[in-house]
Amino acid sequence: MLRIAIQAKGRLNEECLALLADAGIVMSGGNRKLIAHAKGFPMDVLYLRDDDIPQAVAMGVADIGIVGLNEVAEKGEDVDVAMKLGFGACRISLAVPRDADYNGLEWFNNRRIATSYPRILRRFIDENNIKAEIHEIAGSVEVAPAVGMADAIFDIVSSGGTLIQNGLVEVEQVFASEAVLVANKNLDEEKLGEIDKLKFRFSSILDSRGMKYVLMNIPQDRIAAAVALLPGMKSPTLMPLSEEGWYSMHVVIPQDELWEKIEKLKGLGAEDILVLALENIIR
Ligand code: ATP
Ligand code: MG
């Protein structure tokens, strides 16, 4: 039976649980326990701090895990990155005080940079021949320059609001991260088979996220023009209405194109357009 490690609490926890739930996998007893048995898939769930997930998976304490790519890169544990999961997006960036005379990467020479990601930062400054001092701190990295602990920081940024609040500006984006599924490198065939099933469920969910199922009534002589507008999955589904010369057309449209396409379809003569949520795309 597979054992998956996920973050016990924090930014990735809810989206991990939502992804598992969409995949038909639910746990009883909440996350107060260290380990829970899943229903809907033969699997145990281990709730850990995100920092410990790469090591737990590398050691085989868990077979697989869901964790930020940033933690995987920082910890340097030998695990397989099996799949990107499309949530928990963030970047790790260098930021300097707003009033610094920043003039490019050389600015960091002989400066002290506070970070919780010393390994990723070391790699970056070595590759760029910067001689900076790395000052490792566990939390509240963004206050380090204001209290005189460092000249600059290397930290996680998502919206940038925290930087602004602390009088800092992002000057170099170094590492892009999102949540990933990681796997131990020495699993037997049976477990690899189970992981393939899980990946299949996850990819059907990820494919359907951001997509809408759209139904509309359309005159027969407008179908060709509508089809040209909407490549759909293979081709749109068409069903004749009882009213002569009219069809019901069903298509899948990416959310970010939805309104633009709907306006065009209306312009072509489509009527009674229904937009429905799409749960899964099974290919
Ligand atoms: P833990 O208690 O599990 O060690 P943590 O405090 O280290 O948790 P969180 O702040 O919950 O970590 O962040 C978990 C992950 O969420 C990060 O490693 C990163 O991959 C992702 N993430 C996405 N956006 C952000 C953000 N704005 N700040 C921090 N992490 C983010
Ligand atoms: Mg952590």
Image: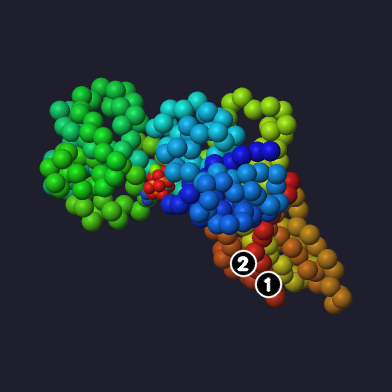
Q: Picture coordinates of residue 148 (x, y %)?
A: 12, 42
Q: Quadrant of the N terminus?
A: top right
105 relative to 220, above or below: above
Q: Picture coordinates of residue 38 (x, y %)?
A: 65, 50
What numbered label is drawn on residue 213? Answer: none
**Going 60% across and 34% down the picture, which residue do you hit?**
63
Q: Which residue is mark 1?
A: 273
Task: Check disc 1: other Cα within 10 Å, few if <14, some if 14-19, many if 20+.
Answer: some
- The quadrant in which residue 244 appears is bottom right
User: Is there a contact, CB below 8 Å, between mark 2 and mark 1?
Assistant: yes
Which residue reaches farthest front?
33
205 relative to 262, above or below: above
Task: Check disc 2: other Cα within 10 Å, few if <14, some if 14-19, many if 20+.
Answer: some
Q: Which residue is mark 2?
A: 262
Rounded to the nearest angstrom, the CA distance separating label 2 from label 1 is: 8 Å
Res 209 visible:
no
Q: Picture coordinates of residue 15 (x, y %)?
A: 52, 53
Given residues 110 and 133, the one toward you in this image is 133
**Going 22% across and 33% down the picture, which residue do you hit?**
135
